[in-house]
Amino acid sequence: MSETTGREEQIRKLAGLIKEIEFAMLTTVEPDGSLRSRPMMTQRVEFDGDLWFFTRASAPKVGEIEHDRHVNVSYSSPERQHYVSMSGRARLVRDRAKIEELWNPAYKAWFPEGLDDPELALLKVSVEQAEYWDSPTSTAVHLVGFAKAALTGESYQPGENEKVNLK
Amino acid sequence: MSETTGREEQIRKLAGLIKEIEFAMLTTVEPDGSLRSRPMMTQRVEFDGDLWFFTRASAPKVGEIEHDRHVNVSYSSPERQHYVSMSGRARLVRDRAKIEELWNPAYKAWFPEGLDDPELALLKVSVEQAEYWDSPTSTAVHLVGFAKAALTGESYQPGENEKVNLK
């Protein structure tokens, strides 16, 4: 398996696991250290290593992310018994072209004014580590060194981290 | 509504929401600040303000909790469109009587040796704050001051925190 294929396959596997899960739980760190989560509608574009969510620019979670960029995005599919954990860093993006690219009418439930809502913004989560469970009793499959591979072009080296159990 | 009833009703509401959700996602903080989550089988006893999970005493999450006790436990029911976030602190409990009280044969999938497994332990999460969504598009219902009420006998005072929206 070439280095590039390794990363592409990891992304493809994760993309397949989260594809039909409509809401993820986004966990952020509050200034006092407590962890909060909330359901976030997932985007319909294929996962490529970044996750995107629509948000209000003034939402409390945006303040939490400005204080501590670490987030976790978890996906639960009780029906298929799939569970995914994605660890990464989030930032607010207000790029109009990206907003238009990701917008779909389902978001009107939260933003009745649609693309003209001045509060409309995106959270971009750059995934650095991911794990998934094909069933809750299975051993976690850890996909570590995700961002590192993306940034350096090097793939993850098994043995680098005892948690890793790449299938 | 009396102060005691307020807390009891909050707990009853949360207990009802999480009752049929078999796996929660437990999020912990790694020493480098990144957030990780994993599916945890939920206990069959009624929620009373604390959450209990079986764990191996040497599991990585136990080390993470010893480093930073803050955790989030999220419950997702895509079928019923219920989402719950519970924020609290976790600690390892190795009390044999409590382990026996909570044990049920379903845990054999993780602990084939059952109650004789020397690694068998419990994580106790004392919930300090909770929020739930009856549907993802609804406004969050925040149940704050949860632990404070439990500790002091005082109920949460609306207006104390702008995030609060007690139904």
Image (tube, coloured by chain):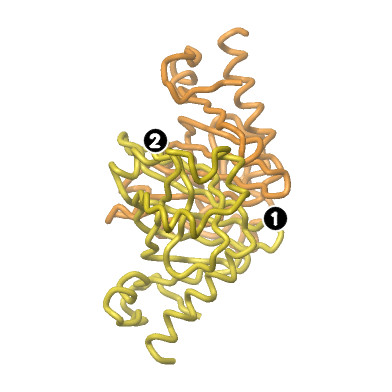
Chain colours: A yellow, B orange
Residue type beneath disc 2: Ser
Residue A115 vs residue B23: left or right?
left
Residue B18 vs residue B72: left or right?
right
Q: Nearer the viewer, residue B128 or B57?
A: B128
Residue A148 place in picture, x, y as percent: 30, 72
- Categorize mark 1 by other alpha carbons within 10 Å: few (<14), some (14-19), many (20+): few
Residue A80: name its quadrant.
Answer: bottom right
> Which of the chains bears the disc numbered 1?
B
Q: Is residue B2 above or below residue A73?
A: above
Residue B12 vs residue B39: left or right?
right
Distance between the alpha carbons at the discs numbered 1 and 2: 47 Å
In the drawing, what numbered circle is on residue A21?
none
Residue B105: name its quadrant.
Answer: bottom right
Residue A107 place in picture, x, y as percent: 58, 47
Q: Nearer the viewer, residue A23 or B8?
A: A23
Circle 2 sits on which residue? A58
Residue B150 is at least partly visible in this image: yes
Tell me which residue sits at (30%, 82%) in the image: A154
Question: Where, quadrant-wise, is the N terminus of chain B in this rendering?
Answer: top right
Residue A101 vs residue B29: left or right?
right
Q: Element type at marker 2?
A: loop
Residue B153 is at least partly visible in this image: no
Residue type beneath disc 1: Pro
Circle 1 sits on which residue? B105
Q: Is residue B139 above or below residue A42?
A: above
> Which of the chains bears the disc numbered 2?
A
Tell me which residue sits at (61%, 36%) in the image: B133
